[in-house]
Amino acid sequence: MEVKASLKYARVGAQKARLVADLVRGKDVNEAVKTLTFLNKKTAGMVKKLIESAVANAEYKKVMDVDSLYVKAIWVDQGPVLKRFRPRAQGRAFGVRKKTSHINVVLEEK
């Protein structure tokens, strides 16, 4: 049995989020949370909260032992890009692309 959780439209680029996702893939849930607690990345807090949400889903379903969960799969997909303009000199405007991503996690019992 597996439990899932997802975070949609996270205001972080997919490439940056994948760096954090690669660190916790395959790890025990407690070890993954400890790793993310001390990681100095913006995405680390988002992924930590997402894993804790998946653990809460497992507790709510009461079908598996929470202490024996591990991160079976975690993947990051690219979300929509918010396009904004930044004023520049002499009346020009440069485009700014604010990237978003969708982060998904699947936990399973060992």
Image (tube, rainbow, N blue to C red):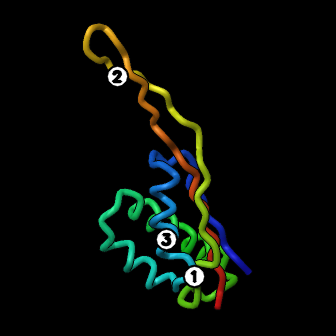
Q: Position of residue 14 (x, y in %)?
A: 52, 52
Amino acid type, callout 2: Arg
What residue is disc 2 on?
86
Q: Is residue 10 left or right of residue 61?
A: left
First in residue order: circle 1 vs circle 3: 1
Give the structural element (helix, strand or loop) at label 3: helix
Q: Quadrant of the C terminus?
A: bottom right
Image height check: is 82 above or below 92? Answer: below
Q: Which of 4 and 76 is in front in this view?
A: 76
The outermost residue toward the right is 1
Residue under label 3, please give it.
52
Q: Name the residue under label 1.
A: 26
Q: In this view, does 46 lie above or below 54?
A: above
Placement of the N terminus among the 4 image quadrants: bottom right
Element at label 1: loop
Q: Kindly identify the residue that appears in the image at 39 percent across and 72 percent down.
A: 36
SS class, disc 2: strand
Q: Do the residues labelled 1 and 3 touch (CB within 8 Å)?
A: no
What's under tag 1, amino acid-wise? Gly
Q: Position of residue 63 (x, y in %)?
A: 69, 83
